[in-house]
Image (spheres, rainbow, N blue to C red):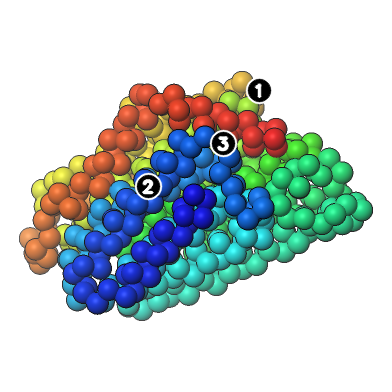
Amino acid sequence: MAIALFLAPLLFALAAFVVPSPRVRPWLVPLGAAVHLGLTIVALRGVGPISAFDGWIVLDKLGRVALPLVSTLFFACSLYVPTYLGLRAERPNRLFCGALLAFLSMMTLITISHHMGLMWVALEANTLASAPLLLFNQNARSLEATWKYLVVGGVGIALALLGSFFLAYAALHAGLRGSLLIDDLVQQAPMLSRPWLHTAFIVLFVGYGTKMGLAPMHTWKPDAYGEAPGLVGALLAGGLTTCAFLALLRFYQVCSAAGEGAFARELMVVIGLLSMAVAGVFMARQRDYKRMLAYSSVEHMGILVLGIGIGGLAAFGAMLHLVNNALTKGVMFIAAANIHRAYGTKTTDTVGGALRRVPASAALFLAGFFAVTGSPPFGPFLSEFTILRGAFAAGRYGVAAAFLGLLFVVFVGMGGTVLAVVQGTPREDLPDTGFRDSIGTVGPALILLIAVVVLGVWVPPGLDAALRDAANLVETGR
């Protein structure tokens, strides 16, 4: 089962490369996503541990949160693929469909990897699989964004590899057997060399923080998210960042098991607040609404590490926010993609009155804005409120005040751009692109929005238990 989870999407990717018909090929993506979601459900309902390759692959408590999340998000986004590629019939789709399914396969491998080296390889392969997705529009801006994504991401992933070596050396320096298996590292954690453990965590935090898009390592995000197709932006903001955060949590798990959680938590609090502040500054008066979503992602990555850094109840809130953020980003990016198709541009200089031109997409974009800024009754409100309660419970009143203040700054800054997009009357001199709302373009975002609303009022007991188990694993290391 563990092997089938990441092998099945790869087989569908291979089929996408082989199938000659450009009309049939896009349907392989939702079909592959449905099979993957079915396998994920079977794996989660299975009795006993799911593992392979002598413990290199294990579906543990963190994986039980991340795997169904990326599978659900990918399935919802995959429903958008046939309609989107039908609208972009002038572009060849063989590489796009194959890369999408390979992207899913590597995300899956990251969520179930229990070996630091294998996890690094999967993340690097995920980066390579996503490069053709960013380049889909084949223009100068998308080419520049792809190169920036590869270069900055490459530096980050190289630092992550260096940090992994430092972690292995922390064991060798202490006279222990060198191993990159998480179970071995957790078991050896109390005896690891402290200077090398601290160095490893800092380097790994910078490396995987770059993949997450934490400030100040976020510079690839505005270009990548701004130039990528909307559904690719959704998968990067909700899928890739989830995987990078998961990788970071696995190293934090080792630190916690070593009794060095306090050292790591302070670094996370500082970088979390810094990311929120940087996002707030760049979202104010932002005219490009797709770049605005990139800075929103920077903000929410900051919220995730801030919650883990505060610890306790806030760590549970961070795990819940991981789910809410991924689903909400799916709503926002797909709705933004529809508005982009309707206007042929993505700046508020020319885009306005979207509620009149594409009412369903604009309504989803507006609802997504309220959700992503933590307004009730949406899921992010519950998770951000839980983090805030955790900060007060931990006596971190200054952090709580800064958190609230930055949320307000982001709400005001983002609101100006979103309202400029949806309100008013469309300019009469703009050409009619012919794009209209349809079930194929609106349905996937609506499904995700319903999920975000449900999570705002009710967290299913099974999900609640999985989130608490994951938070406890991160906090205690075991």
Horizontal side of residue 341 vs 456, given as left or right: left
- Residue that badge 3 annotates: 48
Amino acid, disc 1: Gly
* Mark 2 in CB contact with mark 3 (< 8 angstroms): no
Q: Residue at x 55, y 72 (%)?
A: 151
Looking at the picture, tell me which residue is in the foreground, 55 or 140: 55
Q: Tell me where residue 424 appears, x and y as whole percent.
A: 15, 47
Q: Tell me where residue 149 appears, x and y as whole percent.
A: 49, 68
Horizontal side of residue 53 vs 83, given as left or right: right
Q: Residue at x 70, y 48 (%)?
A: 182
Amino acid, disc 3: Gly
- Residue that badge 1 annotates: 395
Horizontal side of residue 241 vs 363, given as left or right: right
Amino acid, disc 2: Leu
Q: Tell me where residue 359 appears, x and y as whole percent.
A: 13, 46
Residue 202 sits above or below residue 363 on the image: below
How far is disc 2 from disc 3 in space, using C-alphas?
A: 19 Å
